[in-house]
């Protein structure tokens, strides 16, 4: 799981020294670059409101839990983009709001949802609760009249192939 808190534009986020494309940040985690993460969930929360596009050519090997590669003929091909969840604070091209005292609406609700439901619900159910809370329970209040009562809709892109739960290990 990775959380990126920054400013962004056009599919990029600001780093300490320059802009970087989100697809470049995700690339090292994809099946064609990191075989040990193939079949495992890769979750990114991005407070910057950017979009991601890429054509997928697939991955020709699957790594089993034992760490041994299985020849192509004996495996099912898994897309390199499989098992990613990318949640951005706002849809592409939209402004992500924040409260000057309490911070980002998206991050506030993300934390609340994980604290309340993190060990009971699957990830997609939690993301639906996050979307509803941010969409319905928040609106902008500024000193500029034309910027008041504005809304925000987080964007959840799921390429997960199974339900993801965060259950504590039993002792």
Image: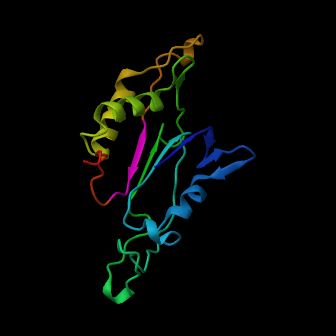
* Residue 119, quarter of picture: top left
Q: Looking at the image, is 19 positioned above or below residue 128?
A: below
Q: Looking at the image, is 130 positioned above or below residue 155?
A: above
* Residue at 37 percent of width and 84 percent of height: 70
* Residue 81, quarter of picture: bottom left
**Where does the image place residue 147, in percent across and percent down from the top left?**
55, 18
**Where does the image place residue 18, in percent across and percent down from the top left?**
73, 47
The front one of 111 and 144 is: 111
**Where does the image place residue 140, in percent across and percent down from the top left?**
49, 19
The chosen color scheme is rainbow
* Residue at 35 percent of width and 74 percent of height: 64
Q: Looking at the image, is 66 positioned above or below residue 15?
A: below
Q: Looking at the image, is 118 positioned above or below residue 108?
A: below
The answer to whether residue 156 is magenta is yes
* Residue at 54 percent of width and 40 percent of height: 93
The front one of 167 and 31 is: 167
* Residue at 47 percent of width and 32 percent of height: 107
**Where does the image place residue 13, in percent across and percent down from the top left?**
62, 45
Q: How many numbered discs sit on the rendered protein?
A: 0
Magenta residues span 154-160
The answer to whether residue 50 is magenta is no
């Amino acid at each position: 799981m990775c959380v990126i808190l920054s400013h962004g534009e056009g599919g990029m986020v600001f780093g300490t020294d320059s802009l970087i494309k989100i697809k470049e940040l995700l690339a090292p985690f994809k099946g064609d670059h990191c075989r040990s993460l193939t079949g495992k969930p890769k979750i990114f929360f991005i407070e910057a409101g950017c979009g991601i596009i890429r054509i997928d050519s697939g991955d020709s090997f699957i790594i089993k839990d034992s760490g041994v590669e299985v020849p192509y003929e004996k495996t099912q091909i898994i897309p390199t983009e499989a098992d990613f969840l990318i949640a951005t604070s706002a849809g592409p091209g939209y402004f992500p709001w924040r409260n000057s005292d309490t911070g980002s609406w998206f991050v506030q609700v993300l934390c609340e949802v994980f604290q309340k439901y993190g060990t009971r619900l699957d990830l997609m159910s939690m993301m639906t609760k996050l979307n509803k809370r941010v969409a319905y329970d928040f609106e902008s209040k500024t000193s500029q009249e034309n910027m008041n009562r504005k809304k925000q809709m987080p964007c959840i892109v799921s390429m997960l192939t199974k339900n993801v739960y965060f259950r504590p290990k039993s002792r």
